[in-house]
Image: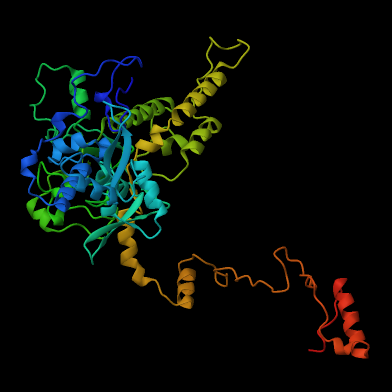
Amino acid sequence: MSNQYAFDFLRSEHTLEGDDTPKPPSSTPLYQETSIVTVSAESVAHKPPLEKQADILRFLKAHRSAGYLPPSIIYRGTGIDLDEVDEVVAVILEKNPKISVEQVPDPENPQIMLSTYAYQSKFNHVRDRATLLAQINRSKYGVDQKDLNDCYDGVEEHIRDLVTAGDIIAVNNSEDKTTVVFPRGETFLTELDGIVNIGENCSNGEMPLEDSTPPLAEAATNQNDEQNKKRNVVCIETDIDPTNQIRRGEAVSIGGEWFRVSSMVRAGVSLEEQPARAQAPLTVTSLTDLSKRNLVDGYHRPFNENTLPLDRRLSEEGANNLEKAKKARKLLHKLVGGRGHSIGAASQLLSNVAHASNPTNLAASLSSTGQGHAKRPTARNKGTGHNTSVDQARKDAKAAQEAASDPSIPLYTHPRRHGCTKGVREMYLKTRSLIPTDEKELYKMLVENKLLEDGEAWRRAKLVKKADVDNDGKKKKRRYYERKNQRMTNTHLVGTAVGALLADAAEKQKQGRSVGDGGM
Protein backbone atom coordinates (compact mmCIF):
# COMPACT_ATOMS: atom_id res chain seq x y z
CA MET A 1 0.00 0.00 0.00
CA SER A 2 1.55 3.27 -1.09
CA ASN A 3 0.48 6.86 -0.60
CA GLN A 4 0.81 8.87 -3.77
CA TYR A 5 0.40 12.32 -2.23
CA ALA A 6 2.27 11.77 1.09
CA PHE A 7 -0.54 13.52 2.99
CA ASP A 8 -1.17 12.44 6.58
CA PHE A 9 -4.83 13.29 6.30
CA LEU A 10 -5.47 10.81 3.49
CA ARG A 11 -7.57 7.80 4.50
CA SER A 12 -7.29 4.27 3.18
CA GLU A 13 -9.63 5.01 0.31
CA HIS A 14 -7.15 7.65 -0.95
CA THR A 15 -4.18 5.30 -1.13
CA LEU A 16 -3.04 3.23 -4.06
CA GLU A 17 -3.14 -0.55 -3.71
CA GLY A 18 -0.28 -2.71 -4.80
CA ASP A 19 3.43 -2.14 -4.58
CA ASP A 20 5.24 1.11 -3.94
CA THR A 21 5.67 1.87 -7.65
CA PRO A 22 4.32 5.38 -8.38
CA LYS A 23 1.34 5.52 -10.69
CA PRO A 24 -0.03 8.38 -12.75
CA PRO A 25 -2.33 10.76 -10.87
CA SER A 26 -5.99 9.92 -11.19
CA SER A 27 -8.97 12.20 -11.27
CA THR A 28 -10.14 10.84 -7.87
CA PRO A 29 -10.43 13.76 -5.40
CA LEU A 30 -8.13 13.87 -2.37
CA TYR A 31 -11.14 13.80 -0.04
CA GLN A 32 -14.42 12.02 -0.65
CA GLU A 33 -16.96 14.44 -2.00
CA THR A 34 -19.80 12.47 -0.45
CA SER A 35 -18.50 13.30 3.05
CA ILE A 36 -18.62 17.08 2.46
CA VAL A 37 -21.57 19.30 1.67
CA THR A 38 -20.31 21.74 -0.95
CA VAL A 39 -20.78 25.42 -0.03
CA SER A 40 -20.62 28.15 -2.66
CA ALA A 41 -18.26 31.10 -2.22
CA GLU A 42 -21.08 33.59 -2.91
CA SER A 43 -23.01 32.46 0.17
CA VAL A 44 -20.16 33.41 2.52
CA ALA A 45 -18.68 36.40 0.67
CA HIS A 46 -20.54 38.90 2.90
CA LYS A 47 -19.23 37.42 6.17
CA PRO A 48 -16.46 39.21 8.10
CA PRO A 49 -13.12 37.42 8.68
CA LEU A 50 -13.92 36.41 12.28
CA GLU A 51 -17.18 34.76 11.22
CA LYS A 52 -15.36 32.92 8.44
CA GLN A 53 -12.82 31.75 11.01
CA ALA A 54 -15.69 30.32 13.09
CA ASP A 55 -17.04 28.49 10.02
CA ILE A 56 -13.64 26.91 9.35
CA LEU A 57 -13.25 26.01 13.01
CA ARG A 58 -16.59 24.18 12.99
CA PHE A 59 -15.70 22.41 9.74
CA LEU A 60 -12.30 21.24 10.99
CA LYS A 61 -13.84 20.07 14.27
CA ALA A 62 -16.45 18.04 12.40
CA HIS A 63 -13.69 16.40 10.32
CA ARG A 64 -10.98 16.21 13.02
CA SER A 65 -10.52 12.49 12.47
CA ALA A 66 -9.28 13.24 8.92
CA GLY A 67 -6.19 15.04 10.24
CA TYR A 68 -4.69 17.97 8.33
CA LEU A 69 -6.81 19.27 5.44
CA PRO A 70 -5.55 21.37 2.50
CA PRO A 71 -7.18 24.70 1.52
CA SER A 72 -8.94 23.05 -1.43
CA ILE A 73 -10.92 20.78 0.88
CA ILE A 74 -11.71 23.66 3.23
CA TYR A 75 -12.90 25.74 0.27
CA ARG A 76 -15.20 22.95 -0.87
CA GLY A 77 -16.76 22.56 2.59
CA THR A 78 -16.95 26.23 3.63
CA GLY A 79 -16.68 28.32 0.47
CA ILE A 80 -13.72 30.17 1.98
CA ASP A 81 -10.62 30.46 -0.23
CA LEU A 82 -7.55 30.64 2.01
CA ASP A 83 -5.09 30.81 -0.92
CA GLU A 84 -6.24 33.96 -2.69
CA VAL A 85 -9.44 35.73 -1.58
CA ASP A 86 -9.37 35.15 2.19
CA GLU A 87 -5.69 35.44 2.99
CA VAL A 88 -6.57 37.54 6.05
CA VAL A 89 -8.51 34.59 7.45
CA ALA A 90 -5.47 32.37 6.89
CA VAL A 91 -3.36 34.74 9.01
CA ILE A 92 -6.00 34.65 11.78
CA LEU A 93 -6.09 30.85 11.71
CA GLU A 94 -2.33 30.64 12.24
CA LYS A 95 -2.73 32.55 15.53
CA ASN A 96 -5.74 30.54 16.73
CA PRO A 97 -4.74 28.04 19.49
CA LYS A 98 -7.53 25.72 18.35
CA ILE A 99 -5.97 25.40 14.88
CA SER A 100 -2.77 23.54 14.05
CA VAL A 101 -1.02 24.52 10.81
CA GLU A 102 1.47 22.26 9.08
CA GLN A 103 3.55 22.93 5.97
CA VAL A 104 3.70 20.02 3.49
CA PRO A 105 4.85 19.78 -0.16
CA ASP A 106 2.21 20.56 -2.75
CA PRO A 107 1.24 17.27 -4.49
CA GLU A 108 1.18 19.04 -7.86
CA ASN A 109 4.47 20.91 -7.34
CA PRO A 110 6.57 19.41 -4.51
CA GLN A 111 8.93 22.41 -4.55
CA ILE A 112 6.13 24.61 -3.18
CA MET A 113 5.10 24.26 0.47
CA LEU A 114 1.36 24.06 1.15
CA SER A 115 -0.32 25.04 4.43
CA THR A 116 -2.68 22.39 5.81
CA TYR A 117 -5.02 22.93 8.75
CA ALA A 118 -6.33 20.65 11.50
CA TYR A 119 -8.46 21.09 14.59
CA GLN A 120 -6.43 21.01 17.80
CA SER A 121 -8.17 20.13 21.05
CA LYS A 122 -6.98 21.08 24.52
CA PHE A 123 -5.63 17.57 25.03
CA ASN A 124 -4.22 16.92 21.59
CA HIS A 125 -2.50 13.70 22.66
CA VAL A 126 -5.82 12.02 23.58
CA ARG A 127 -6.70 9.96 20.52
CA ASP A 128 -8.32 6.75 21.84
CA ARG A 129 -9.78 5.14 24.94
CA ALA A 130 -6.40 4.20 26.42
CA THR A 131 -4.94 7.71 26.19
CA LEU A 132 -8.26 9.15 27.41
CA LEU A 133 -8.12 7.06 30.59
CA ALA A 134 -4.43 7.91 31.06
CA GLN A 135 -5.17 11.64 30.87
CA ILE A 136 -7.99 11.41 33.43
CA ASN A 137 -5.82 9.35 35.78
CA ARG A 138 -3.14 12.06 35.61
CA SER A 139 -5.65 14.77 36.55
CA LYS A 140 -5.80 14.57 40.33
CA TYR A 141 -8.37 17.35 40.60
CA GLY A 142 -10.53 16.20 37.70
CA VAL A 143 -11.08 17.24 34.08
CA ASP A 144 -14.06 19.11 32.67
CA GLN A 145 -15.77 16.76 30.24
CA LYS A 146 -16.34 19.55 27.71
CA ASP A 147 -12.54 19.83 27.36
CA LEU A 148 -12.45 16.16 26.36
CA ASN A 149 -15.51 16.02 24.09
CA ASP A 150 -13.64 17.41 21.08
CA CYS A 151 -10.56 15.16 21.30
CA TYR A 152 -11.74 12.58 18.75
CA ASP A 153 -14.86 10.99 17.34
CA GLY A 154 -16.63 8.74 19.81
CA VAL A 155 -14.99 10.19 22.93
CA GLU A 156 -18.36 10.80 24.63
CA GLU A 157 -19.28 7.13 24.26
CA HIS A 158 -15.89 6.11 25.68
CA ILE A 159 -16.37 8.41 28.69
CA ARG A 160 -19.78 6.87 29.30
CA ASP A 161 -18.32 3.36 29.06
CA LEU A 162 -15.48 4.24 31.47
CA VAL A 163 -17.99 5.60 33.99
CA THR A 164 -20.16 2.49 33.71
CA ALA A 165 -17.13 0.20 34.09
CA GLY A 166 -16.07 2.10 37.21
CA ASP A 167 -12.72 3.20 35.75
CA ILE A 168 -13.49 6.89 36.39
CA ILE A 169 -15.91 8.95 38.50
CA ALA A 170 -18.24 11.57 36.98
CA VAL A 171 -19.67 14.39 39.11
CA ASN A 172 -22.14 17.08 38.08
CA ASN A 173 -21.02 20.64 38.80
CA SER A 174 -24.18 22.45 39.85
CA GLU A 175 -22.59 25.90 39.50
CA ASP A 176 -21.85 25.91 35.77
CA LYS A 177 -23.97 22.84 34.83
CA THR A 178 -20.99 20.81 33.62
CA THR A 179 -19.68 17.32 34.32
CA VAL A 180 -16.24 16.76 35.81
CA VAL A 181 -14.53 13.37 35.58
CA PHE A 182 -12.04 12.13 38.19
CA PRO A 183 -9.74 9.09 38.46
CA ARG A 184 -11.25 6.33 40.60
CA GLY A 185 -8.32 4.19 41.67
CA GLU A 186 -8.97 0.66 42.89
CA THR A 187 -12.46 -0.77 42.36
CA PHE A 188 -14.48 -3.04 44.65
CA LEU A 189 -16.51 -5.63 42.73
CA THR A 190 -19.05 -8.11 44.08
CA GLU A 191 -20.39 -11.23 42.40
CA LEU A 192 -24.17 -11.60 42.36
CA ASP A 193 -25.96 -14.85 43.09
CA GLY A 194 -27.35 -16.65 40.10
CA ILE A 195 -25.91 -18.19 36.95
CA VAL A 196 -26.57 -16.07 33.85
CA ASN A 197 -27.53 -17.50 30.46
CA ILE A 198 -29.07 -16.37 27.20
CA GLY A 199 -32.72 -17.36 27.56
CA GLU A 200 -35.46 -17.91 25.02
CA ASN A 201 -36.94 -14.42 25.45
CA CYS A 202 -33.54 -12.70 25.36
CA SER A 203 -34.62 -10.17 22.71
CA ASN A 204 -37.82 -9.15 24.54
CA GLY A 205 -39.51 -9.09 21.14
CA GLU A 206 -37.35 -6.17 19.96
CA MET A 207 -35.56 -5.75 16.65
CA PRO A 208 -32.12 -4.12 16.47
CA LEU A 209 -32.32 -0.34 16.17
CA GLU A 210 -30.00 -0.33 13.16
CA ASP A 211 -31.88 -3.19 11.45
CA SER A 212 -35.08 -2.16 9.66
CA THR A 213 -35.56 -5.51 7.94
CA PRO A 214 -38.29 -7.87 9.16
CA PRO A 215 -37.42 -10.98 11.22
CA LEU A 216 -35.85 -13.93 9.46
CA ALA A 217 -38.17 -16.01 7.38
CA GLU A 218 -39.36 -19.38 8.58
CA ALA A 219 -37.18 -21.05 5.97
CA ALA A 220 -33.98 -19.64 7.55
CA THR A 221 -31.52 -22.17 8.84
CA ASN A 222 -31.04 -22.90 12.54
CA GLN A 223 -27.54 -21.47 12.35
CA ASN A 224 -28.82 -18.12 11.11
CA ASP A 225 -31.50 -18.13 13.81
CA GLU A 226 -28.85 -18.73 16.48
CA GLN A 227 -26.64 -15.94 15.13
CA ASN A 228 -29.59 -13.54 14.98
CA LYS A 229 -30.44 -14.48 18.56
CA LYS A 230 -26.94 -13.61 19.76
CA ARG A 231 -27.04 -10.22 18.04
CA ASN A 232 -30.31 -9.21 19.70
CA VAL A 233 -29.80 -10.00 23.39
CA VAL A 234 -31.25 -7.31 25.68
CA CYS A 235 -32.43 -9.51 28.58
CA ILE A 236 -30.35 -12.06 30.50
CA GLU A 237 -31.79 -15.11 32.22
CA THR A 238 -30.71 -15.87 35.80
CA ASP A 239 -31.76 -18.59 38.25
CA ILE A 240 -31.73 -16.42 41.41
CA ASP A 241 -33.81 -13.27 41.90
CA PRO A 242 -31.60 -10.24 41.00
CA THR A 243 -34.08 -7.62 42.26
CA ASN A 244 -32.81 -8.09 45.83
CA GLN A 245 -29.22 -7.55 44.74
CA ILE A 246 -29.21 -4.66 42.27
CA ARG A 247 -31.39 -1.72 41.22
CA ARG A 248 -32.43 -0.34 37.88
CA GLY A 249 -29.84 2.12 36.55
CA GLU A 250 -26.91 0.54 38.39
CA ALA A 251 -23.92 -0.90 36.54
CA VAL A 252 -23.65 -4.65 36.00
CA SER A 253 -21.05 -6.80 34.21
CA ILE A 254 -22.33 -9.57 31.90
CA GLY A 255 -20.07 -11.66 29.68
CA GLY A 256 -17.08 -9.38 30.28
CA GLU A 257 -18.99 -6.19 29.31
CA TRP A 258 -20.43 -3.45 31.48
CA PHE A 259 -24.06 -2.37 31.17
CA ARG A 260 -26.70 -0.47 33.08
CA VAL A 261 -29.73 -2.32 34.34
CA SER A 262 -32.30 -1.00 31.87
CA SER A 263 -34.52 1.82 33.12
CA MET A 264 -36.01 2.91 29.79
CA VAL A 265 -39.71 3.74 29.66
CA ARG A 266 -39.81 4.69 25.98
CA ALA A 267 -39.15 2.11 23.30
CA GLY A 268 -36.71 2.78 20.47
CA VAL A 269 -34.88 5.53 22.37
CA SER A 270 -31.42 5.27 23.95
CA LEU A 271 -30.98 5.58 27.69
CA GLU A 272 -29.53 9.11 27.38
CA GLU A 273 -32.68 10.29 25.57
CA GLN A 274 -35.09 8.89 28.14
CA PRO A 275 -36.91 11.28 30.55
CA ALA A 276 -34.70 12.57 33.36
CA ARG A 277 -36.53 10.44 35.91
CA ALA A 278 -35.70 7.29 33.88
CA GLN A 279 -32.06 8.05 33.18
CA ALA A 280 -29.32 6.13 34.97
CA PRO A 281 -27.34 8.10 37.58
CA LEU A 282 -23.75 9.13 36.92
CA THR A 283 -22.66 6.91 39.79
CA VAL A 284 -22.37 3.15 39.29
CA THR A 285 -24.45 2.54 42.43
CA SER A 286 -27.45 4.27 44.01
CA LEU A 287 -28.98 4.35 47.49
CA THR A 288 -32.61 4.59 46.38
CA ASP A 289 -34.75 3.32 43.53
CA LEU A 290 -35.67 5.50 40.56
CA SER A 291 -38.85 7.58 40.49
CA LYS A 292 -42.08 5.69 41.25
CA ARG A 293 -43.64 7.47 38.31
CA ASN A 294 -41.68 5.12 36.08
CA LEU A 295 -43.72 2.25 37.50
CA VAL A 296 -46.91 4.04 36.48
CA ASP A 297 -45.67 4.49 32.90
CA GLY A 298 -44.21 0.98 32.92
CA TYR A 299 -40.64 -0.03 32.15
CA HIS A 300 -40.02 -1.25 28.62
CA ARG A 301 -37.88 -4.26 29.60
CA PRO A 302 -38.87 -6.64 32.44
CA PHE A 303 -36.87 -6.89 35.66
CA ASN A 304 -38.09 -9.82 37.76
CA GLU A 305 -36.99 -12.93 39.64
CA ASN A 306 -35.44 -14.58 36.55
CA THR A 307 -34.76 -11.71 34.11
CA LEU A 308 -32.01 -9.07 34.17
CA PRO A 309 -32.58 -6.33 31.52
CA LEU A 310 -29.69 -4.48 29.87
CA ASP A 311 -29.62 -0.90 28.60
CA ARG A 312 -28.10 -1.95 25.27
CA ARG A 313 -27.57 -5.10 23.27
CA LEU A 314 -25.05 -7.70 24.28
CA SER A 315 -22.23 -7.91 21.77
CA GLU A 316 -21.54 -11.12 19.91
CA GLU A 317 -18.30 -11.50 21.85
CA GLY A 318 -20.18 -11.23 25.15
CA ALA A 319 -22.72 -13.82 23.98
CA ASN A 320 -19.89 -16.17 23.02
CA ASN A 321 -18.33 -15.71 26.46
CA LEU A 322 -21.58 -16.81 28.12
CA GLU A 323 -21.73 -19.84 25.82
CA LYS A 324 -18.13 -20.77 26.69
CA ALA A 325 -18.88 -20.58 30.40
CA LYS A 326 -22.01 -22.72 29.94
CA LYS A 327 -20.09 -25.43 28.07
CA ALA A 328 -17.27 -25.37 30.63
CA ARG A 329 -19.76 -25.83 33.49
CA LYS A 330 -21.42 -28.74 31.70
CA LEU A 331 -18.07 -30.44 31.18
CA LEU A 332 -17.05 -29.97 34.83
CA HIS A 333 -20.50 -31.12 35.96
CA LYS A 334 -20.06 -34.30 33.93
CA LEU A 335 -16.55 -35.02 35.20
CA VAL A 336 -17.38 -34.64 38.90
CA GLY A 337 -20.48 -36.81 38.70
CA GLY A 338 -23.28 -34.26 38.85
CA ARG A 339 -23.93 -31.28 41.11
CA GLY A 340 -25.73 -33.40 43.68
CA HIS A 341 -22.66 -35.57 44.28
CA SER A 342 -19.92 -32.97 43.75
CA ILE A 343 -18.28 -31.68 46.88
CA GLY A 344 -15.69 -29.14 47.88
CA ALA A 345 -14.08 -27.14 45.10
CA ALA A 346 -16.34 -28.41 42.30
CA SER A 347 -19.51 -27.60 44.22
CA GLN A 348 -18.35 -24.00 44.67
CA LEU A 349 -17.49 -23.57 41.00
CA LEU A 350 -20.83 -25.05 39.91
CA SER A 351 -22.99 -23.37 42.54
CA ASN A 352 -25.43 -20.65 41.55
CA VAL A 353 -24.50 -18.83 44.75
CA ALA A 354 -21.61 -16.40 44.32
CA HIS A 355 -18.42 -17.10 46.25
CA ALA A 356 -15.22 -15.20 46.94
CA SER A 357 -12.85 -18.17 46.68
CA ASN A 358 -9.90 -18.03 44.34
CA PRO A 359 -10.83 -20.12 41.24
CA THR A 360 -7.18 -21.08 40.73
CA ASN A 361 -6.95 -22.53 44.23
CA LEU A 362 -10.28 -24.31 43.78
CA ALA A 363 -9.08 -25.89 40.55
CA ALA A 364 -5.82 -26.99 42.18
CA SER A 365 -7.69 -28.57 45.09
CA LEU A 366 -9.57 -30.91 42.76
CA SER A 367 -6.47 -33.04 42.25
CA SER A 368 -5.83 -33.36 46.00
CA THR A 369 -9.42 -34.14 47.01
CA GLY A 370 -9.85 -36.93 44.47
CA GLN A 371 -12.90 -35.60 42.66
CA GLY A 372 -12.58 -38.36 40.04
CA HIS A 373 -14.60 -41.47 40.88
CA ALA A 374 -12.73 -44.80 40.97
CA LYS A 375 -14.46 -47.86 39.60
CA ARG A 376 -14.78 -51.07 41.60
CA PRO A 377 -12.27 -53.79 40.69
CA THR A 378 -13.72 -56.44 38.39
CA ALA A 379 -12.61 -59.84 37.18
CA ARG A 380 -11.23 -58.23 34.04
CA ASN A 381 -8.71 -55.99 35.82
CA LYS A 382 -8.13 -58.26 38.81
CA GLY A 383 -4.60 -59.58 38.91
CA THR A 384 -3.35 -57.59 35.95
CA GLY A 385 -0.40 -56.27 37.90
CA HIS A 386 -1.57 -52.66 38.21
CA ASN A 387 -4.47 -50.85 39.84
CA THR A 388 -6.65 -49.69 36.95
CA SER A 389 -9.16 -47.97 39.23
CA VAL A 390 -6.47 -45.79 40.80
CA ASP A 391 -5.09 -44.82 37.41
CA GLN A 392 -8.55 -43.93 36.17
CA ALA A 393 -9.21 -41.89 39.29
CA ARG A 394 -6.05 -39.91 38.67
CA LYS A 395 -7.00 -39.29 35.06
CA ASP A 396 -10.48 -38.15 36.11
CA ALA A 397 -9.03 -35.84 38.74
CA LYS A 398 -6.62 -34.33 36.21
CA ALA A 399 -9.41 -33.84 33.65
CA ALA A 400 -11.60 -32.23 36.32
CA GLN A 401 -8.75 -29.93 37.32
CA GLU A 402 -8.24 -28.84 33.70
CA ALA A 403 -11.96 -28.23 33.29
CA ALA A 404 -12.09 -26.19 36.50
CA SER A 405 -9.12 -24.13 35.30
CA ASP A 406 -11.16 -22.78 32.39
CA PRO A 407 -11.12 -18.97 32.96
CA SER A 408 -14.62 -18.59 31.51
CA ILE A 409 -16.16 -20.25 34.61
CA PRO A 410 -15.13 -17.62 37.19
CA LEU A 411 -15.28 -14.71 34.74
CA TYR A 412 -18.65 -15.18 33.04
CA THR A 413 -20.77 -17.46 35.27
CA HIS A 414 -22.06 -14.83 37.69
CA PRO A 415 -22.89 -11.17 37.03
CA ARG A 416 -20.83 -8.57 38.85
CA ARG A 417 -21.55 -5.15 40.28
CA HIS A 418 -19.70 -2.32 42.02
CA GLY A 419 -19.85 -2.28 45.79
CA CYS A 420 -21.96 -4.47 48.05
CA THR A 421 -25.35 -5.81 46.99
CA LYS A 422 -28.63 -4.00 47.49
CA GLY A 423 -29.67 -6.26 50.39
CA VAL A 424 -26.42 -5.76 52.31
CA ARG A 425 -26.53 -2.01 51.76
CA GLU A 426 -30.14 -1.76 52.96
CA MET A 427 -29.34 -3.89 56.02
CA TYR A 428 -26.45 -1.58 56.89
CA LEU A 429 -28.52 1.58 56.47
CA LYS A 430 -31.32 0.17 58.67
CA THR A 431 -29.06 -1.03 61.47
CA ARG A 432 -26.31 1.59 61.62
CA SER A 433 -28.40 3.72 64.01
CA LEU A 434 -28.34 0.81 66.50
CA ILE A 435 -24.55 0.89 66.76
CA PRO A 436 -23.47 3.08 69.71
CA THR A 437 -20.89 5.76 69.10
CA ASP A 438 -19.45 5.55 72.60
CA GLU A 439 -16.53 3.11 72.79
CA LYS A 440 -17.56 1.65 76.17
CA GLU A 441 -21.11 0.95 75.00
CA LEU A 442 -19.81 -0.55 71.76
CA TYR A 443 -17.45 -2.82 73.72
CA LYS A 444 -20.33 -3.94 75.94
CA MET A 445 -22.45 -4.76 72.87
CA LEU A 446 -19.62 -6.80 71.33
CA VAL A 447 -19.31 -8.83 74.53
CA GLU A 448 -23.07 -9.40 74.74
CA ASN A 449 -23.14 -10.70 71.16
CA LYS A 450 -20.12 -12.95 71.90
CA LEU A 451 -17.93 -11.16 69.42
CA LEU A 452 -15.43 -10.50 72.22
CA GLU A 453 -14.65 -12.24 75.49
CA ASP A 454 -15.19 -10.32 78.70
CA GLY A 455 -11.93 -8.59 79.54
CA GLU A 456 -10.47 -9.14 76.08
CA ALA A 457 -8.74 -6.16 74.52
CA TRP A 458 -10.65 -5.19 71.42
CA ARG A 459 -7.72 -3.39 69.88
CA ARG A 460 -4.00 -3.31 70.35
CA ALA A 461 -2.41 -0.53 72.31
CA LYS A 462 -0.96 2.16 70.14
CA LEU A 463 2.78 1.84 69.75
CA VAL A 464 4.71 4.82 71.09
CA LYS A 465 7.97 5.53 69.35
CA LYS A 466 10.81 6.51 71.66
CA ALA A 467 12.77 9.57 70.69
CA ASP A 468 16.21 8.15 71.63
CA VAL A 469 15.72 4.86 69.71
CA ASP A 470 16.19 4.35 65.98
CA ASN A 471 13.98 2.30 63.62
CA ASP A 472 15.80 -0.91 64.59
CA GLY A 473 15.21 -0.39 68.31
CA LYS A 474 18.83 0.51 69.02
CA LYS A 475 19.80 3.49 71.14
CA LYS A 476 20.79 6.46 69.05
CA LYS A 477 24.39 7.66 69.25
CA ARG A 478 24.92 11.36 69.70
CA ARG A 479 27.54 12.72 67.37
CA TYR A 480 29.37 16.01 67.49
CA TYR A 481 30.66 17.45 64.28
CA GLU A 482 32.84 20.46 63.59
CA ARG A 483 31.85 22.67 60.71
CA LYS A 484 34.32 23.09 57.91
CA ASN A 485 36.70 26.08 58.39
CA GLN A 486 35.29 26.66 61.87
CA ARG A 487 37.54 28.86 64.02
CA MET A 488 37.52 29.95 67.62
CA THR A 489 35.90 33.35 68.06
CA ASN A 490 36.65 33.88 71.77
CA THR A 491 40.22 34.81 71.06
CA HIS A 492 40.48 36.85 74.30
CA LEU A 493 40.27 33.55 76.24
CA VAL A 494 43.37 32.15 74.60
CA GLY A 495 46.02 31.48 77.26
CA THR A 496 43.51 31.44 80.13
CA ALA A 497 42.11 28.49 82.13
CA VAL A 498 38.72 28.81 80.45
CA GLY A 499 40.34 28.84 77.03
CA ALA A 500 42.21 25.65 77.91
CA LEU A 501 38.92 23.94 78.86
CA LEU A 502 37.30 25.03 75.56
CA ALA A 503 40.23 23.72 73.54
CA ASP A 504 40.09 20.41 75.40
CA ALA A 505 36.32 20.12 74.71
CA ALA A 506 36.85 20.84 71.02
CA GLU A 507 39.45 18.09 70.82
CA LYS A 508 37.04 15.60 72.45
CA GLN A 509 34.31 16.58 69.95
CA LYS A 510 36.63 15.78 67.07
CA GLN A 511 37.14 12.33 68.56
CA GLY A 512 33.38 11.79 68.96
CA ARG A 513 33.50 11.73 72.74
CA SER A 514 30.88 13.28 75.00
CA VAL A 515 31.73 16.62 76.59
CA GLY A 516 28.60 17.01 78.70
CA ASP A 517 25.95 19.71 78.52
CA GLY A 518 28.01 22.46 80.12
CA GLY A 519 26.03 22.33 83.33
CA MET A 520 22.78 23.27 81.57
Q: Is residue 214 left or right of residue 282?
A: left
Residue 311 position, x and y percent, is 20, 43
Residue 41, x across and y down, in percent: 9, 40
User: In x, y percent, where is residue 194?
Assistant: 31, 41
Q: Is residue 267 above or below residue 35?
A: below
Residue 504: give x, y in percent of width and height. Answer: 91, 80
> In the figure, residue 317 lies in which quadrant?
top left
Q: Find residue 28 and report its image quarter.
A: top left
Q: Residue at x 26, y 16 (%)?
A: 24
The chosen color scheme is rainbow
Of 177 and 150, nearer the camera is 150
Tell me the quarter of the image containing the C terminus: bottom right
Residue 241 visible in image: no
Using residue 80 as the reference point, say whether residue 420 is left or right of it: right
* Picture residue at 24% right of the left edge, 33% below the top: 198
Q: Nearer the viewer, residue 420 or 179?
A: 179
Query: Up-down: is 328 above or below 95?
Result: above
Residue 210 seen anywhere in this rendered image of the structure: yes
